[in-house]
Amino acid sequence: MTTTTVTLDDIRQAHERIRSGIYRSPCPPSIPLSDLTGCQIWCKLDLLQRTGSFKERGARNALLLLEPAQRSRGVVAASAGNHALGLAYHGKLLGIPVTVVMPRFAPIVKVATCRRLGARVILEGESFDDARRLAVEMAETDGLNLVHGFDDARVIAGQGTMALEILEDVPDVEVIVVPTGGAGLLAGVATVAKGLRPDIRIIAVEPAAAGSLSASLVAGRPTQVPTRPTLADGLAVGKVGALPFEIAAPLIDRVVTVGEEALSLAVIRLLELEKTVVEGAGASALAAVMGDVGKELAGRRVVLLLCGGNIDLTILDRVIKHGLTADGRLWRFTTQVTDRPGGIAKLTAAIAAAGASVQEIVHDRAFSGPDVFVTSVEVTVETSDRDHVVALYDHLRTAGFVVVPSTAAGPVPTRHG
């Protein structure tokens, strides 16, 4: 296999090479997501891989391409999550020692899972760059083969096998939407799609908190950008890989940037409509199509790559609440009521009359002002959508309440239409 680029033949060979050890994930149509977006939507469900992400494809291909001596010594990689899991799992299946260097902030569950799968896990540094530096050092000093998570021809070829399966299942696909961090998946998928069907549009999606691909396309070379915490932690890469950028840059039709609110909403939509738990990175494809790009693709045959399902359960509750708030289905406000019998009852009656449901009420007598017969209350309500929030706001004001939306809830949304 070539090492300075990745060809369609490389990816076809990788597909045959890994076929026996990789789940052939389905790519079914989605009626609810099609109704939601106005596009004809199919979902490539690679989150159904054994370790929950597409990363197994590239990991297995890289391991199978090792020379016998390299197999016996083993491999090393720096990863905070899915790449580490894929290497650990397939290393165990193939009898190849795997060492994973993870930053200290790596999710505890992923650290534990890697160890359970037989990998040697080393926690190093406060950033991914710290972990990467140690992995590179270990590769040189211990004679281990370094398997980069995205800037590696073997890995790119493995990831690209997903596109071969998509074209088998949806041969008339018009658009493929690819979550993008380091751009390894993007490079592999674009190589196949454009090689077999040059008319297919390739849309890359990256989080606003880590916009390296956009910056790199402007600069004409891989460019380091600052990153911020993001729900799409699997895409939080500060600099796209040199090889995947070289491959993908001429093949991309568009880059879409999505924010945290859109990512939370996409996770919620997939939970509700597809009954599927998708991590933020995997949900980014839907987040893009739910935005303006979806209007441009109305009626087109679109495949979304739902490529990861390893969302941290400790934050899932927060993600759901954040998504419901963004969707206008949770709203919080403060107001004042008389601190006499019947004060709260009047407020809750007004809320009920508007068709909303009280989730929580918190009293604040100490900081309600000089009138000791008045108390401030912070109220969290369940509503049906943004229009319902507007209707509730108007109804409460008509009933005589001064309503101040909480900062977290944002301003009162404008009525749709």
Image (cartoon, rainbow, N blue to C red):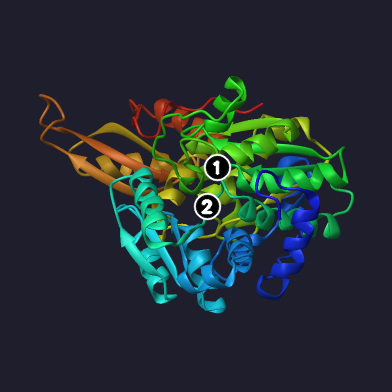
Q: Amino acid at mark 2?
A: Gly
Q: Residue at x 42, y 69 (%)?
A: 114
3D distance between C-alphas at marks 2 and 1: 8 Å
Residue 103 appears in view: yes
Numbered label attached to residue 182: 1
Which residue is labeled 2 in the image? 149
* Dot 1: element: loop
Residue 379 versus residue 64 in the image, above or below: above
Q: Position of residue 182 (x, y in %)?
A: 55, 42
Asked if residue 106 lies left or right of residue 232, the reply is left
Q: Position of residue 185 (x, y in %)?
A: 64, 48
* Nearer to us in this view, 263 or 181: 181
**Above or below: residue 315 compared with residue 377:** below
Q: Residue at x 25, y 40 (%)?
A: 343
- Is there CB contact under 8 Å for labels 2 and 1? yes
Task: Report the quarter where the C terminus lies.
Answer: top right
Q: Quadrant of the N terminus?
A: bottom right
| Picture quadrant of residue 220 | top right
- x, y percentage for residue 167? 83, 54
From the viewer's perspective, is residue 417 above or below residue 243?
above
In the displayed structure, would residue 255 be above or below residue 5? Answer: above
Residue 301, visible in the rendered structure: no
SS state under label 2: loop
Residue toward you, 282 or 118? 118
Q: Between residue 241 and residue 389, name the one nearer to us.
A: 241
Which numbered marker is on residue 363? none
Q: Image point 63% across, 55% down: which residue? A: 154
Place of residue 102 in the rendered image (x, y in percent of width and height, measured from the top left): 36, 56
